[in-house]
Amino acid sequence: MASCFRTKAASTPLARYLLLFPDAHPEIGMKTYTSLHDYLEQLRKSIAPLDTGQVADYIPELAKADPDRFGIAVVTVDGHVYQSGDARLPFSIQSISKAFTYGIALEDKGHEEVARRINVEPSGEAFNSISLEPETGRPLNPMINSGAIVATSLVDGENGDAKLQRILEKFALFAGRPLEVHQDIYESERTTGHRNRAIAHLLRTYDILEDDPEPVLDAYFRQCSILVTTRDLAVMGATLANDGVNPITGVRALEAKRVSSVLSVMATCGMYDYSGNWIHRVGMPAKSGVGGGLLAVLPGQLAVAVFSPRLDAKGNSVRGIATCEALSSEFGLHMLRVTRVTTASVVRASYTGATVRSKINRDETSNELLDEAGHQVQVIELTGELRFVSAEIVTATVVERMQGCDYLILDMERVTSIDQSALALLTELVATLAAEKKLILLTGTENHYTFRRRMKHRFHNHENPPNLAFADVDRALEYAEDRLLGTARADNQNGATLSLQEHLLCRNFDTQELALLAGLLEEARYDAGEMICEEGTPADELYFLASGRVSASVRLDHNRRRRLSAFAAGWTFGESALFAGAKRSADIHADTPVLVHRLDPARLRKLDDPNAMRVALKLFRNLAELSLSRLGHVNREIRNLSN
């Protein structure tokens, strides 16, 4: 019972163990598993004892199928493949081929010509029913045999062999590999296909088939005898879900404007006289085949394929229906479920600490170290609603981006909701990263109570739990940068005090100038959280930060704040005091216990000393240089974020 998990982005040991589900937690009330692979395994094992139904026996070759064979495959529009059981065992595609051949006919002959010969109304009858319009002779839809035979006739090709070749070439684009006809199944179909032969000749009497029916019938029998695996079917379905582009190869298999027509008839007619119940219970366009295959497509997201030869009285795979019902219920895959998320927009931004920094202003040595080591910090900002597929995209993105990184900052500030399946995926993603000794910082989670509760419960007493303490990416980046720089020299975070000559604003001051400036300074201390300057008040003092850290922030609505910048020891803040009549543009709080030296610029201006003018000029010059440096840094970050 071989199974595997693949991603288009990575095949590293970490990648192979990601996309995991959590262990069961009774207080949350979820059915959960240790991995998506394990989920499919457990689902298959739970459904395998379902032994009702019979293998199709009206075609002798199909009667030879092992009734206990059972495979499941799921493929997303991003090219991720999950499979379990007999997912690589070949079987004949049978009626599932009808959906794809109908798409080829639309592409080759156009909608009007196809509609003139095949209607799209549900018949509510069995797959082999003779459902023709009384006056025109048109089959009611392309999913019953009569409509499928006409669809095959409309495929480009001067004879049956040419039409079959066209079908095989197009099917290969859908599956991402060449497919072939099983000769014994074809012979069995051909020798027992009396009802289909009768249908074809009846269509000829209405001129729906304009030529000898036999070559078209032969092509149709061969089409139904094409061998596929469960994985092949899932890839073919994911190609429809991906607007006609194969998500594995990136090759277009069907014109985009034809995809909606194919999915529409699959939704309304694909399960024959079970179609109404199917769309109500499962909610995905689907097609079944008497060979035991079943394909369900969730547009824009994924496809599910199942192989199990036991059929119900309507010709649908018993285990296939049970599997799709479970998947749809467990992960909310019903296409009519209201959702506002798009999978393409779930990752708002992705960057490293080498390209985007926290707002803390650090010394030159620290900045140089972060230039070299910042790539170890990976930031991924999320947005929108997180559901199964969007969370799967998040996980795949993390897998790809975390190669060579030791820190992950996953920002959820703009996430509007997280459903149970996404919660499961994200929890185990964090667990796997934690096991790899990665440091995980989860930001913006204040409004996601269930998520926080799940994380705290799962990682209670864990040696490497995720950090939920940060409200935004900026604060988390600062923390990660401090870790990179090392606790022994994280910008004097341990209380070391810098001298005046070590301040960036005092660069190139001589001894006399430093002495003059020092004589004008007043020492002040502030506790962590204490207000130093308030927005809108007169800017009458300039502050030289000797130890600790401070942050400048503005007040937003609903008692929220946004940090604009932050300063470590060696930096100066409150520079607007150098300009007469200025007011504070932000609040400044002490993040840690701080020591500052305050300068009243008015005192400097009043001094009758040549050195006073030089001090003032150097302060302005250094301020201008620092401002230009900050502007350049901001421009680089904007450019990186834009890219």
Image (cartoon, rainbow, N blue to C red):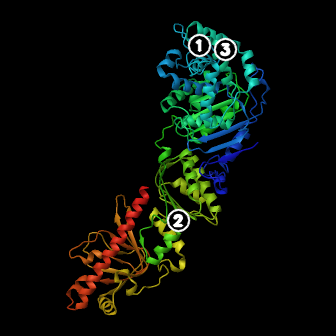
Mark 1 Cα-neighbour bin, 10 Å: few <14, some 14–19, many ≥20: many
Separation (CA) of disc 1 from disc 3: 12 Å
Q: Quadrant of the N terminus?
A: top right
The answer to whether mark 2 and mark 1 are in CB contact below 8 A is: no
On the image, which quarter does residue 266 sit in?
A: top right
- Which badge, 1 or 3, is on the more N-terminal residue? 1
Q: Say which element carries label 2.
A: helix
Asked whether the viewer can see residue 602, the reply is yes
- Earlier in the chain: of badge 3 and badge 2, it is 3
The amino acid type, in three-letter code, at marker 1 is Ser
Say which mark, if any, is on residue 196: 3
> What residue did someone put label 2 on?
375
**Residue corresponding to mark 1:** 131
Viewer-side label of 2, 1:
2
Residue 562 seen anywhere in this rendered image of the structure: no
Return the x and y of residue 477 as percentages of the image width and height.
48, 66
Residue at the image position 59 percent from the left and 41 percent from the top: 249
